Amino acid sequence: HPTRMREAPQTRFMTSPKGDSMATPLLTTYTQWQTFRNCRRACHWRYVRELVPRSGAPAQHLGTLVHDALQHWHQHRDLEAMLARIDQACAGRAADDDQRQRWHLARAMMQGYAQCYAEEAFRVVALETPFEMPIRNPATGRISRRFRLAGKVDGIVEEHGQYFLLEHKTASHLDGDYLERLWLDLQISLYSRALETIHGVPIAGVIYNVLCKAQL
């Protein structure tokens, strides 16, 4: 059932024929830097060689489907239109077992969500908000001439006169390890800082909108 608790455009590295960085800073994303931090070779394959899997993991497909449905729900608050959007995204479910499973899960999760959160305590200010900002050296204050940071925030909401990020997530289950990882989520810190810097919006915190996958 849904549980309530109070990544970004694809880019590439570009170089000049001499191997030096171009004068225009290159757009990078949190996902790109996270990949670089975890495995530099994987980052090279993905963002320099532009090698990607032929198809993503099933969990990734479901997450994308539910994320899109949530954005539509918070924008229009129309359950039937939201379910029709899921139907359209899984138009080939009759001949595709994986797609049919995602369709069943997404519909069940979103129907439960709409019932549980028919009314929200917050007011939606903006959805799918993109941003772009310079990367600054915290020690010297200098701005990087090679890279800039870009991203997209799921939502910005207002509650009791304060602004919060709204972050959608799907999970197979919710436990202490999952919650502990949220406290260490560097992406949220970066996105909060970006919005405060670019738009002058003071971010008081983040509302994690976590939908657990139906088990049946």
Image (cartoon, grey):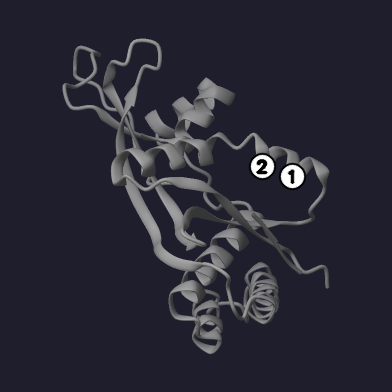
Please state the horizontal and vertical placement of residue 18, each as a whole percent of the image: 20, 12
Q: Secondary structure at mark 2?
A: helix
Q: Which mark is residue 179?
A: 1
Can residue 49 be seen in the rendering of this structure?
no
Q: Residue furthest bottom?
A: 80
Q: Residue furthest front?
A: 161
Please state the horizontal and vertical placement of residue 129, each as a whole percent of the image: 36, 55
Q: From the image, which quarter does the C terminus lie in?
A: bottom right
Please state the horizontal and vertical placement of residue 26, each as a whole percent of the image: 27, 30
Q: Is the residue under label 2 in contact with that under label 1 (CB below 8 Å)?
A: yes
User: Is 50 positioned to the left or the right of 26 in the image?
Assistant: right
User: Is 2 positioned to the left or the right of 119 in the image?
Assistant: right
User: Is 160 positioned to the left or the right of 209 in the image?
Assistant: left
Disc 2 marks which residue? 182
Front-lying residue, 210 or 123? 123
- 60 up-or-down from 93: above or below: above
Q: Residue at x 51, y 76 (%)?
A: 73
Front-lying residue, 78 or 139? 139
Distance from disc 1 to disc 2, alpha carbons, whole Å, reads 5 Å
